[in-house]
Amino acid sequence: MKAAGTPLSAAGRLARKLAAQLDDRGIDSQISECEGIALVGIWSVGLAVWCEWGPQGWRFRWCVNETTYRGTWRYTSCPASAVETATARIVRLHDERYERMHGANTRQAPR
């Protein structure tokens, strides 16, 4: 039996690493994990980041369209080995969406 809060999978460990990086930059997120699949939800801007296994190994993957977009959805990804790069790209997308949704970027400054 695993202790409470212990990641159950590689995807869960990656999700927690990404969530910690986002938290360091003042962005709240929520982790969901089940059966080896993990998701980092940044619900303040309707953004979900999957931690998934792909042809080149583990990666973070997310949709770049707004949740209200009507058309062909576009996705992007970043190797999980480049968590700092993924974090920077997700922070930039978060800030753009937050400003469009709320008129200003009021998230906390990086810690």
Image: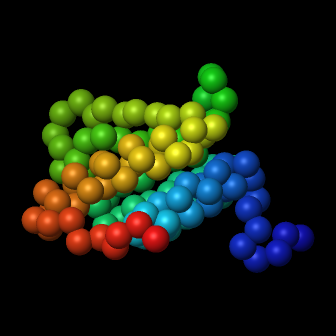
Whether residue 73 is visible: yes
Please name whichever residue, 109 or 54, is drawn nearer the observer in this view of the structure: 109
Vertical side of 57 occupied by 103: above or below: below
Vertical side of 74 occupied by 88: above or below: below
Left or right, residue 30 beside residue 89: right
Instruction: Please provide percent x and percent y for residue 93.
Output: 30, 48
Whether residue 35 is visible: no
- Specify the farthest residue to the right: 1
- The mark total stands at 0
Instruction: Please provide percent x and percent y for residue 80.
Output: 60, 40
Which residue sits at x=46%, y=49%? 87
For the rendered model, the colour scheme is: rainbow
Which residue sits at x=23%, y=71%? 106
Which quadrant of the structure image shows residue 16?
A: bottom right
Instruction: Please provide percent x and percent y for residue 20.
Output: 56, 63
Q: In which quadrant is the N terminus drawn?
A: bottom right
- Specify the farthest residue to the bottom: 4
Instruction: Please provide percent x and percent y for residue 77.
Output: 46, 34
Vertical side of 83 occupied by 1: above or below: below
Left or right, residue 80 beside residue 87: right
- Specify the farthest residue to the top: 55
Please name whichever residue, 103 or 51, is drawn nearer the observer in this view of the structure: 103
Which residue sits at x=57%, y=34%? 79
Which residue sits at x=13%, y=57%? 100
Please name whichever residue, 43 or 70, is drawn nearer the observer in this view of the structure: 43
